[in-house]
Image (cartoon, grey):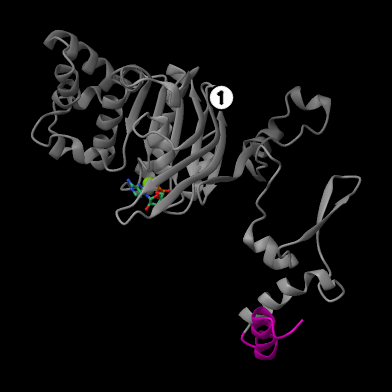
Amino acid sequence: MFIRCENLVKIYKLVDDAELMALQGLDVEIAEGEMVGIVGASGSGKSTLMNVLGGLIQPTAGSVIVNGRPLLKLTEPQLDRYRRDEVGFVWQQSTRNLIPWLNALENVEYPMLMAGKSRQQARERATELLTLVDLEERMSHHIEMMSGGEQSRVAIAIALANNPSLLLADEPTGELDTRTAQLIYDLFRQLNRDLNLTTLIVSHDPGIARHVDRVISIRDGKLAGETIRSRPKPNSPDDNDKGDNNSEEEAEERFEELTVLDGTGRLQIPEEMRDEFGLVRRVRLERTDEGVLIKPIDQASSSENQPTKEIDAKQSPTSDKEGGRLRRWLRGDEG
Ligand code: ADP
Ligand code: MG
């Protein structure tokens, strides 16, 4: 595994001694050369994960191994080297860090000159990088004269300057229109293939699954689910023969949303399913021929389930009576 996060926890200390648990025991594995999308509501911990993987913040607990390096155990100089040699970043609004009055070439050269490269080395590498992101015709254009998509390409070229093995992009297409975003995803894919670049892209775009190998979704600082591309099974062995009439069907991609088990066997059942099937607090697991069935407990007949039922009833506006009983029960007035 190129990246392995186990039980990753990140707690931010807030001003008034309060704490915020941004990652709550996250388990993620990513193979070398894989291109993965990361989705999740705002505040679910996506950027925190990217910062941890980039070596920019230390997690509070758990383990992260990237390309054989245990990030929690690295010394400061080792972490510096990791950030410098191993990782490329495309940050949210990274185009704002470009210098508007310099041209594309100068913008890519600038960080390399700061890092001590000679003018000639920087020029050669910058030319190479801008060619890689399909901007060879636009190198002498000033940033302020470039479109949003072109500016993103310049930011990506800069991220690739150190020839990283891991590319982290945090909402790189957030400010682009759909068509331009599509082209940027295509570019990420091309770089992923040509450079064998393990690539993680945080996105709000629900359509990201089409552009990546796998999408992982994060909820409340934990891995909640995965979407994979599922290939339809071939109907018969002859399918490989010619079957031009099949190609259209084959081109149609299917996606399958999977739920993830953590290392201790816990899984999260989506809220819609819990609501639909009345899965509250306790459920019954039954073995069937196909697998494990998660069944609601028949609440009326289950006395042990009563407190849960009444808490539920309390939240319903039509059951004041039950709510009153619950309150009395909580006070201990009622057995
Ligand atoms: P996302 O990128 O999914 O929107 P973040 O990783 O940025 O989520 O944030 C996760 C949670 O951690 C949020 O509640 C956010 O407010 C909090 N958070 C992020 N960075 C910091 C920080 N430097 N200090 C304190 N809290 C933070
Ligand atoms: Mg974020």
- Extreme bottom residue here? 321
| Residue 308 sits in quarter | bottom right
Q: Residue 171, image x and y in percent?
A: 37, 43
**Is residue 323 or residue 172 the one in the foreground?**
323
Task: Judge whether 242 appears above or below 203 on screen.
Answer: above
- Extreme right residue here? 289
- Look at the image and say whether residue 318 sits in the magenta stretch: yes
**Residue in the picture at 29% in, 39% down:** 149
**Residue in the picture at 18% in, 17% down:** 115
Q: Residue 214, image x and y in percent?
A: 57, 36
Task: Judge whether 81 appears above or below 217 on screen.
Answer: above
Q: Please, what is the three-letter code of the amino acid marked with disc 1?
A: Ala
* Apparent side of residue 280 relative to residue 82 in the rendered image (left or right): right
Q: How many marks?
A: 1
Residue 50 in view, yes or no: yes
Q: Quadrant of the N terminus?
A: top right
* Apparent side of residue 311 relative to residue 137 in the rendered image (left or right): right
**Is residue 108 or residue 112 the one in the foreground?**
112
**Is residue 177 or residue 24 the one in the foreground?**
24
Q: Residue 203, image x and y in percent?
A: 43, 45
**Residue in the picture at 28% in, 36% down:** 152
Q: Residues within 10 Å of mark 1 (few under 14, many from 20)?
A: some
Residue 187 in view, yes or no: no
Q: Residue 66, image x and y in percent?
A: 48, 23
* Apparent side of residue 308 relative to residue 86 in the rendered image (left or right): right
Label 1 secondary element: loop
- Extreme front residue here? 332
Which residue lies under the disc numbered 1?
31
**Residue in the picture at 77% in, 27% down:** 239
Q: Which residues are magenta?
A: 317-335
**Is residue 92 or residue 136 the one in the foreground?**
92
